[in-house]
Amino acid sequence: MTGSCLCGKVRYEAEGELTAMHHCHCSRCRKHSGAAFVTDGFVAASGFRWLSGEDALRVYRVPGRTSTRVFCGTCGSSLGGHDERWPDFIVVNAGTLDDDPGTRPLYHIYVGSKAPWFTITDSLTQFATAVEQEG
């Protein structure tokens, strides 16, 4: 699968499947995406590579956290990130994918901190925090 930022300067390719696709409502993801939630999933780090625009990438390390956020320094598109707790995976923001990844979101996480003005209307499982903490 391939993906890119809004201006097209940064492009990436990921081999394999997008797994654990979900909607995250945590305040960090909301700020990073500028939306009520971000839809993302995981790809194997071993099959991920930047095709172009690596020089335009900007990385923000979340203070006090194990995660980094990656975005295009030209257009500002949020591309995903990485979390040291899961070194074998890259987080990909689903909105940056060029085509249908062939999977659908499985659940919502951090609904305990979701935007108060947003109402979840689907029937996906909802977790107050992260999946690993819920069960």
Image (tube, grey):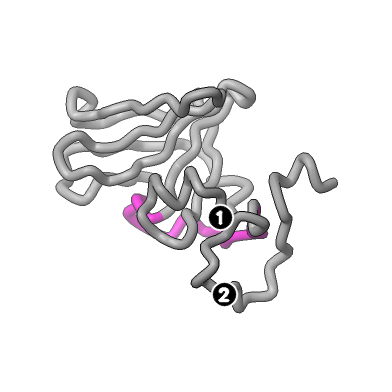
The tag on residue 72 is none
- The residue under label 2 is 119
The answer to whether any part of residue 97 appears in the image is yes
Does 114 lie within the magenta span? no
Q: Is residue 112 left or right of residue 28?
A: right
Residue lying farthest to the right in this orientation = 135
Q: x%, y% of residue 127?
A: 73, 56
Please name whichever residue, 43 or 121, is drawn nearer the observer in this view of the structure.
Answer: 121
Q: Tell me if residue 54 comes above or below residue 117 in the rendering.
A: above
- At label 2, the amino acid type is Thr
Magenta-colored span: 95-109
Query: Which SS class for mark 1?
Result: loop
Q: Which is nearer the N-term, disc 2 or disc 1?
A: 1
Q: Tell me if residue 108 comes above or below residue 40 in the rendering.
A: below
- The residue under label 1 is 25
The 10 Å Cα crowd at callout 2, few under 14, some 14 to 19, many 20 or more, is few
- Residue at 50%, 32% (x, y): give it: 90
Q: Is residue 99 left or right of residue 115?
A: left
Question: For residue 65, which quarter of the picture?
Answer: top right
Q: x%, y% of residue 107?
A: 66, 59
Please name whichever residue, 134 or 52, is drawn nearer the observer in this view of the structure.
Answer: 134
